[in-house]
């Protein structure tokens, strides 16, 4: 891990402990929870491993086993930790309902599902596939978030609300992407191979959007809520509707300058889109 | 609590116990469950607090702590109890699959999520925000229903099926509203402030509808299943489609006389709408 | 149970144990899980009953009670077992992400929810309705799959990903049907009676599709992702969009020859549909 | 199972259910417990298997596994059931604090430990030693009763209070024996082979008595509380003290006519013994 | 509750919270435990009810039910609370290993078993016998302390170490009594009625002593470790041995001036007793 | 850790895994248990930490926390590991009922309590007393073995059966000591300071023996079952009875040559002792 990231991790962990300490002091009913999940731990990776182990365990997959698994992964792989840090920052910066880093760490099922998937992905790459798939199943049961362990996720990802998200085996998600709940990055049939969407950096995908097939959603593109996307979407354009059309027209779509995955601007295209509204 | 409501509460509790007793007698395999959740309790608030405490607890948030929290809230705040009663009535009257009040009390995740959110809302208003957010997280994990504790909910609300419902921080839902599963009352960006929909009394929102931004859905309006609504919907009109349009046209939309949130008429607009169907 | 099915069951169980044994050997961290769920059991019905009992139990509905309930049902009713076998085959054949039968048996919430619903359906038909509804509630909490116990399900059904699926009381689903996540087979109002969709054999319903009312989706028809269907869809045609229209037009819709519920071809209609894409 | 025993079993089970029903009616707080442990079951063997499974389970030995194990044993082996019946009768007849059969079935750790040991003994005889020893360990943890699975136990045995009882590998206990808490039937060294006490029919062993080595406690003998017995005790005599001496003297010990294991007369020898009391 | 006792309760609770706070600060690994058991509660009775509910619960007797039961008892019955306070003081004053009040409250199984028995005794007196006996059973399983709910216990009682203590149905224990582990206050046979020991105020009973029958242990008497007592022991005398004899002789036993139950002097009689030692 | 011990640890771990593998193969019902406790772990310290964490956890002291605590202790302190190894050897060599090392590791509550106490002792010495005492309490609840964390334990210790063992704060136990169940090494009063027995190397203490006060049990001495010892016992002599006397007389006690703590010869003194038997 680079020095800068190490410093950031240290800063963030200090911040999280300060938040938790403040909350524990003002709310005795929550203090036990905050001590067990955050304040009793010596590092972010231990806190996160403890929390995931207790959240994802079942009567047949014990918390101690999962805790061990997560702790080994987070301790040995810097990139998992730096991705977690980038995701925490993403939630704090992009979601106005995110009141603190500890709030995201403890309560955001999208954040937790994403960290657990990254560990599952590491297992998948190490050919420990049965274990990776068992993890996927626990994440899908507990968080209602179903991301195949083979899917590749970037950093700085925000799965906001997250319930119902489905991401297929050959999907790729870039950096600084924001994906709302009920979003599907799905396949197209029963043939294997490369069959799921590729999401570029900085993309924003609205709630309930369904993107199917090996299509490319270009950098900084935006997919409107409820859209059904079966085609490529060029960089910095907006696709909306069912079936999804490019705002501004297929030939000369409107381009935006901001990075929607970071600006989280869901609805600025309305004025243009409203032409279709009777 | 007013006398009339007290009487209603007493009547309803008597009814629920009678239903549970009948079920326990005819189904020994379920008797233990019915006694622990209903028949061993002396009041509706105790039964509900016990059930929520056991449903929402985790290894780090114990059932006894949650039971205490819920019981304190329901015992000290009449409006929470009268809202629960109105919700039980709503489910029984509007959902033909609801065979009894006890069925709703025990099995409806929408009902349970809603009661728990009201307690979280009370905590939020008392500035116990960390605890309120922890509750939101448990509700989102257990029921896959994600309602921000700051959102304001009226009475007589039916969250039917409820899986995947997302309601944002500044959303307001009126009385006698019916909301199907996968419905989103979402925000529009990363700026805070008043940014979520306001749902009037008697509104019906169909399955999978997405309503974004600080828009107003007028009293007695109807939003069709799968609609994506980014605009105000006038009272007693119907919005359908993606993007949602008013049935009858923007200028002179068709008006209905019934209260869709109570009549649950999801599809009467089809004849009119079918003009758009090729 | 017919001889052929008995042989198939024996073959499949042998296969599942071989897969689990191979995984247990290569992944010690998972061996305990694989022995408790599969390798310690003498039959598929015992393994499945154990797994469902442990997945669906709660602090008020104990695993031993549920295990007993499931084992009694699967042991005494051949059709439940042959349906489970057909569903396992369906997942393995139609879903390229399904790497083994044991993967489906252990990890597919759609498969598990479906088997549990069939037991609930059996209870419902035996007038043990309170117990059937309690099971439905557990399935909805644990898997976020909400299928009314009165709904009739055929064999060879694949609920892929499954999160958010809602199937109403009078719905009927034929054989060899594939249904993606977030699909609703819903009702139309608060009046009881026959009010939910009838899905023919071999139908494919894409992610997020909402089908409302007592409409008929003909044999081998296809419903596109995100569609909102309020009308009958003839056999071997494709309905897409919100509101859903028949590809090729209402008068002379395009017909396909394959069985979409088995071929899982989600997107071949795009070329035709893309005419609507601006 | 003989007809007479079958009838007794049926009578006893009817009795137990009647007791539990009466208690459930008068004590709602206990009704859930009584339904889950007794009233929801169709037979004594199911009730007992359920209760033992839930008492003896741990996070690594699941209740469903143990339930299965116990139910298989009790269902297939009549002698286990008739021994349980004799033990229930023994407690009810000999212990004035035993208010009902259901009280013994649910609450007597001596009774429960004894039934579980008999199943472990059956496993031991079937050469399933690792499982038998795991059961012994669970019984020792949960009930603080440590009986080696190889020890042979008769019928109509009362382990009263039972905490701290230790019975070694080659010990044999006859029929209608009563053994108080803290009693040890121990070995004499590190050499294997036949090295533990043999307890005849109708023997009574007082609290805290320690009997060591392959000694013979004759039929109807009595061992006083706190005695340390290293020698044979003839039939119908009483041994008391540390080291234990025969009441009446080694040469011509006093003989009693009753069966102490059934009459439970702990202290009638006091007058004679008091000669030793200064 | 008298004013003085109220003040003492308030003082003690302040003390306990201060101890717990100090421990939580110096030992983060224990902070979660201390907050959940002590620091999150508003009163001693709530803390104690929570702790007992979580210690004594099982899969069939839920913690929420027990918590409710204990809280109702401790809230409504001052004498239960003042007895608990006297017991806490007894442990702190008499046991040099007791480092703090919170140490006793959290960790002393004798203290916890005693408080739970007092609640069971209250239930017994209210004719809620089945529930009282179920509690006895849980206490016996969890703490290996078996006190019949009908037994009458005074205040200021110290059950030191406590494992293996057995106290029968008609036993009575006075105030300021200290009883070591493995002590039996047992009956004499199978006839009901008044058949257990009566222990006077200020008595000390050494480890492993067995006292049988309706005998009277006079005020301030002492029973040596391992003694077997079948006779009355006069006030302020010492009984030792098996069978127990009075130190100094039956006719003119030695009298002591201190209160052994408070001074905890186990062995001062040795010099006198050693005459019997060869 | 010395090389020889490292090799022994490696050999023993290989042995334990081989035993567990053999048992898992011959007993599928136990395989899940054996994999989770032994076969999935990479070292004895991980297996032991996992097993202790799961055995000693409670709803307020989570298994993950305890696992972490034990693993840190066993990993960082060689002497804890070598003591565990010596204890495993002691059980296997001295207890004819100990069929394998894995049997001891998994099932011997004396072994497990002893290892956990050593960790508590380490915490005590590091001034983490509140945590050490909390551990003591869990050990006392779960195993009914109550050893103060300040007590000093040697290596090669066998607590056989172990139920009811009580060891006080200032007790010291040497190497190669064997202690049966119900043994007390207790104090003499309420004054603090050095007040508990000192047990020399190679001592054997029989079941139910009570040793009180700061007395010295010399090297290779033997204390008979049920003895009450209030005096020093010279090396290689035997004390028996209540009160305990030296076999052979106080002046010229019989001396033995073997090491009773290793030879486990409980009863060879009988012939001599029997002179006291009338």
Image (cartoon, coloured by chain):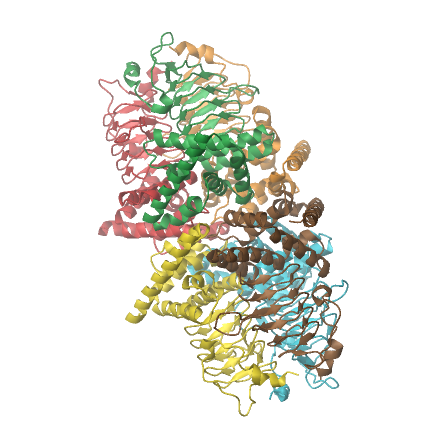
Chain colours: A orange, B green, C red, D yellow, E brown, F cyan
* Image quadrant occupied by the C terminus of chain E: bottom right
Please indicate whether residue B126 sits to the left or right of residue C268 in the image: right
Q: Nearer the viewer, residue C3 or D71?
A: D71
Could one spot residue C65 in this view of the protein? yes
Please indicate whether residue E15 sits to the left or right of residue F139 in the image: right
Q: Position of residue C83 (x, y in %)?
A: 29, 44
Q: Position of residue B220 (x, y in %)?
A: 39, 18
Q: Nearer the viewer, residue D252 or A7?
A: D252
Identified at 70% across, 74% down, the residue is: E237
* Residue positioned most to the right: F193
Q: How many numbered marks, from 0 up?
A: 0
The picture quadrant where one finds residue B23 is: top left
* Residue positioned most to the top: B251
Q: Position of residue A102 (x, y in %)?
A: 61, 34
Could one spot residue C143 in this view of the protein? no
Please, is residue A17 above or below residue C269 in the view? below
Identified at 39% across, 29% down, the residue is: B90
Identified at 49% across, 36% down, the residue is: B141
Q: Position of residue E193 (x, y in %)?
A: 50, 69
The picture quadrant where one finds residue C96 is: top left
The picture quadrant where one finds residue F54 is: bottom right
Q: Nearer the viewer, residue D24 or B257?
A: D24
Please, is residue E57 above or below residue D72 in the view? above
């Amino acid at each position: 891990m680079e020095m800068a990231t190490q410093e950031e991790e240290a800063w963030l962990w200090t911040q999280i402990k300060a938040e938790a300490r403040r909350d524990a002091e003002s709310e005795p009913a929550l203090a036990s929870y905050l001590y067990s999940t955050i304040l009793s731990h010596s590092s972010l990776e231990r806190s996160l491993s403890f929390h995931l182990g207790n959240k994802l365990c079942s009567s047949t997959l014990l918390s101690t086993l999962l805790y061990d698994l997560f702790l080994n992964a987070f301790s040995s792989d810097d990139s998992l930790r730096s991705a977690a840090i980038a995701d925490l920052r993403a939630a704090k910066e992009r979601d106005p309902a995110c009141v603190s880093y500890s709030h995201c760490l403890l309560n955001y099922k999208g954040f937790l599902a994403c960290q657990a998937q990254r560990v599952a992905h590491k297992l998948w790459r190490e050919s420990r596939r049965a274990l990776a798939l068992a993890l996927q199943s626990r994440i899908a049961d507990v968080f209602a978030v179903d991301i195949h362990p083979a899917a590749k996720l970037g950093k700085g990802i925000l799965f906001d609300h997250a319930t119902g998200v489905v991401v297929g085996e050959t999907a790729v998600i870039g950096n600084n992407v924001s994906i709302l709940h009920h979003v599907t990055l799905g396949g197209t049939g029963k043939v294997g191979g490369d069959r799921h969407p590729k999401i570029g950096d900085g993309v924003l995908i609205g709630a309930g959007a369904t993107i199917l097939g090996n299509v490319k959603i270009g950098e900084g593109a935006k997919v409107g809520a409820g859209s059904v996307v079966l085609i490529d979407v060029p960089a910095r354009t907006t696709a909306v509707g069912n079936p999804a059309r490019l705002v501004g027209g297929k030939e000369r779509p409107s381009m935006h300058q901001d990075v929607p995955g970071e600006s989280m601007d869901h609805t600025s295209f309305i004025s243009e889109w409203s032409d279709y509204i009777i």
